[in-house]
Amino acid sequence: MNAYRWPALLACILTSAPGHAQQIGVREQVSVDVPAGLFGSGSPTPELKQQARKLAIDKAWRRYQAQNFSQARAQQAIAHEAALRGKVETELCSFSFYDERFEKETRKFSLEVRGSCDQRRVDAVFQQLSAASGATDAGGGVPAAAPRQRMPSVSFVFLARRAASATDQRENASTVSTNGSESVADQQQSSRGTSSSVGSEQVSVTQRARTSTTQFDTQYQYEVEATDDAMTAVASVLQTNRFRVSRYPDLVTTCSGPGLGELSRRYAEMRVSTAWSPAETKGMFDAVRQCEVPLFAFGLMEVLKAQQSGIGATTVTVSLNVRVNDLSSKVPSECASISSQFQAVGRDRLEATKAALKHAADQGTRELVDIMRQNCLN
């Protein structure tokens, strides 16, 4: 490949990667039957073409939902199906039609639709629908604007780590035996009444060798990864969805609790990422309660692997686990949680890791917000 073209191509890859784009592409194909006698000039009528295009948009919108909606958001979409469908073409997505063709032999009219949906607009519409739930105007069931409500408060912290080295431990255990021959006379030399003819016979004795191998789990040494960009992505999604946000590292400057540095080091030292002691968990909960914040989101991100995906391009995979606890009562209750994996591309491992962490935080929080609306705000 021409060396001068590669930077431009890589820039295109990066800007179209999930971590960088707010426009989500979708495409679909449809084919409709053309009734006999409905066309006279050898082509379908404009009405039939419009019907096919509408069918294509509906099909593309369903595919977009299937590929991008969490289970919680999918349930909201069903509840507000009519209101959402009325906004798809006017506010949420744009569509173009290609390869329109009519086959006379089969009387089929086919076309392809390519769409681009604005993820931020979709988020905003769902926030409006949630806020206006149950309220409708007199113009056909479209949810009306609800009175402005006090924003729910949430504190959050996201930690990240990556494996810096690995030790593969194995233990081998085996028993060794030999094959050979020995005389019956020798075996029975302590027996006095043995016949001399028997003593001259030879008997072959074979023993099997058995070997066993035990392999232990690989031992990893972890290093802390910075989460500044990831934390900003989390805050942005929460603020867009009308949450009052308190970053945990800022909160503990007022309400005493384990700081970000202490938590990050502890996470890096853990062999099992869920092995937080009750004292550590209580320290975080007490700090959030002391500052009178009812919801606390605790996220753990782990960089799983980095692999070359082209010349000068690296793909990094990040695992994300987040749980949200309602601390408004004496006993904390977990009201939302997610566990998923995300990928992003960069020019090298460092750039790809930074993009993957940010992408995981952004997309994971979007999914989390849908669950929080259902379970944490009632």
Image (tube, rainbow, N blue to C red):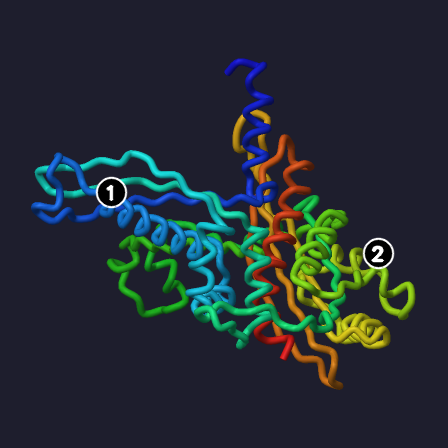
Instruction: Please state which amino acid type lies under the numbered disc 1.
Output: Pro
Which residue is identified by label 1? 46
Q: Secondary structure at mark 2?
A: helix
Residue toward you, 269 or 311: 311
- Residue lying at 89% horizontally and 70% vertically, measured from the top left: 255
Task: Tell me if residue 376 can be seen.
Answer: yes
Q: Secondary structure at mark 1?
A: helix
Instruction: Please state which amino acid type lies under the numbered disc 2.
Output: Gly
- Residue lying at 57% horizontally and 61% vertically, measured from the top left: 367
Cβ–Cβ under 8 Å for marks 2 and 1: no
**Residue 278, located in which quarter of the rendered image?**
bottom right
Which one is earlier in the sequence, the residue at label 2 or at label 1?
A: 1
Which residue is identified by label 2? 261
- Left or right of 79, for residue 339: right
- Residue lying at 53% horizontally and 56% vertically, measured from the top left: 214
**Residue 295, located in which quarter of the rendered image?**
bottom right
